[in-house]
Amino acid sequence: MNEHVTHLTGENIQQILGEESFERPVLVDFWADWCAPCKALMPVLERLAAEYGGQFLLAKLDTEAEPQLAAQFGVRNLPTVALFKDGQGVDAFSGALPESEVRQFLDRHLPKVWDEDVNLAKNLMAEENYLEALPLLKSAYEMSGHEAGIERLLIEVYIRTKRLEEGRALLEAIPFQFQDDDFRRLQGLLDLAEKASETPEIKELQDKLDSDPDNQDLKYELALQYHSDGRIREALEHLYQVLLKNKGFRDGAARTSMVEIIQSLGKGDSLAVEYQRKLFTLLY
């Protein structure tokens, strides 16, 4: 028996449900030796208890050895599995469910591995420390399978850190039926940020480039200005376009600038990965 599995008895019920369940969820498995479905389910529960590494305690209650406890909990069918948090039963199921359904049951109630990062990111956002919140939310967003609540936080951080292209891409992908008041708040933030990002320097360079679209010097200067203003995707794309025309532009200045921007994004950043691949394909 592993350290995350125990037997529930009349002697330790107070310690297990009255104390332990305040520290972590306790999954109580009501079983009996004569019950074939119980014997099929128990190895699944034991394996999950080990795999989840202490996120919950599996407490096995032998209903033949502890009939009064089984009656106290109102158990009528075997196997029955009940989840306790803070001394209270919060959910239960009966029957030998397949492992995939047991996982779904657990995942509805157990803390997610990314919850700590999300909570830390929220605290950083409250302190307006958006740059430090960004990698935490990006990681949590990927690990959660693009959970909607994390996505909204990530959109806001993208906007606050002037990564407006990424923010708009996520925002515009939200289905119409989920475009609620919070969606409209984020849309307003994005619109204001985009208007503010049109600095006189950018506008002047863009106007010149519109009149002379093949001028690589202008394109390079505009890329640097975009980077200065936090418009990272536009900066990288302009540098990439310069390198497409001239790999050795300004004795390697465009290449160096592009590499430095990519490195500043951090390892694993989706935008960094995208332009690393483009740069590698172009140069090699």
Image (cartoon, rainbow, N blue to C red):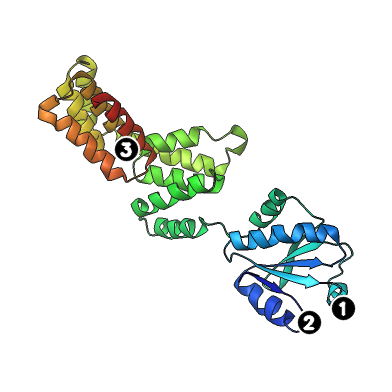
Left or right: 28 with respect to 71?
left
Residue 70: which quarter of the image?
bottom right
Secondary structure beneath label 1: helix
Point out the tag, 2 or 1, that comes first from the N-terminus.
2
Residue 4, given in percent of the width and then of the height, sits at 62, 69
Q: Do the residues bearing badges 2 and 1 touch, measured as CB atoms within 8 Å?
A: yes
What residue do we see at 50% from left, 44% from top? 151
Residue located 43% across and 34% down the image: 168
Q: Where is residue 231 in the image (x, y as percent from the top left)?
A: 30, 36
Residue holding disc 3: 196
* Relative horizontal placement of residue 34, taking residue 50 as reference (left or right): right
The residue type indicated by label 1 comes to Gln
Determine which residue is flagged by label 1. Answer: 68
Residue hosting label 2 = 10
29 versus 205 height, above or below: below
Identify the residue at horizontal 43%, vertical 56% (top origin): 121
Asked whether residue 191 appears in the rendered view, the answer is no
Q: Quadrant of the N terminus?
A: bottom right
